[in-house]
Image (cartoon, rainbow, N blue to C red):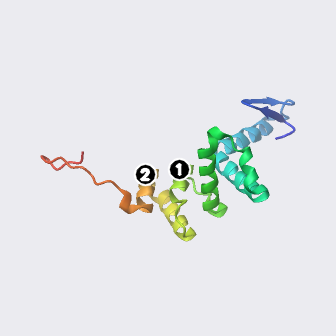
Amino acid sequence: MTDLVKYGRRELLFNRRPADIEEAEEVAQTLMYFNEDLPWLFGDFLNQCEGFFGEEFAQIIPDKSQKTLRNWMFIAAAIPSRIRHYPLSHSHFASVAGVQDKEKQEELLQKAVQLGWSVKRLRQEVRPGDTKPKKTCPHCGGEL
């Protein structure tokens, strides 16, 4: 992709005309991966930079993005790459990042896929005691 396109801040330009539609499709696929995988890519990048440079790496994290990027770092460090393949949102993975047992993480992610769990439902499985009690109508007993 690097010889075909160049990109800058909020811009992508072709360096040359794609040889065929398949070459253009490869660029499209790569861009889709960037979109879907950005939290993973950035988290892994920053974790590795921290390993290379120690505390000095903090200089490359913009102040306004600190919370988000630190969160991505935590999730990337907590979720082994071998189990990132599940077709779930990054928020699903974030829900199990605090689970220390990696086998339990994978078991929960598998169930989320198999049973179609939402992020909220997965969080309830991770922290069953954290669910708020359901309010019921005193007249009919229905859930409010």
Q: Counting other residues with Cα less than 10 Å from the Cα at mark 2, is it few (<14), some (14-19), or many (20 or more)?
A: few
Badge 2 marks a residue whose secondary structure is helix
User: At which x and y percent is residue 22?
Assistant: 78, 39
Confirm or deny contact between disc 1 and disc 2 (CB under 8 A): no
Q: Which residue is mark 1?
A: 91
- Residue 141 visible in the displayed image: yes
Q: Which residue is mark 2?
A: 120
**Side of 14 where 50 appears, left or right:** left
Front in this rendered view, residue 63 or 101: 63
Furthest-front residue in this view? 55
- Up the image or down, 107 lies above or below 144; here it is below
- Up the image or down, 75 lies above or below 34; here it is below
Residue at point 82% right, 34% down?
5
Residue at point 69% right, 48% down?
42
User: At which x and y percent is residue 113?
Assistant: 50, 57
Residue at point 66% right, 51% down?
40
**Side of 31 where 103 appears, left or right:** left
Question: Could you tell me how far apart the alpha carbons at marks 1 and 2 are, in whole angstroms?
Answer: 10 Å
Residue at point 63% right, 38% down?
64
What amino acid type is highlighted by mark number 1? Ser
Marks 1 and 2, the one that precedes in the sequence = 1
- Residue 79 visible in the displayed image: no
Front in this rendered view, residue 55 or 98: 55
Image quarter (top left, top right, bottom left or bottom right) of the N terminus = top right
What amino acid type is highlighted by mark number 2? Lys
Residue 42: assigned label:
none
Q: Counting other residues with Cα less than 10 Å from the Cα at mark 1, is it few (<14), some (14-19), or many (20 or more)?
A: some
Front in this rendered view, residue 93 or 131: 131
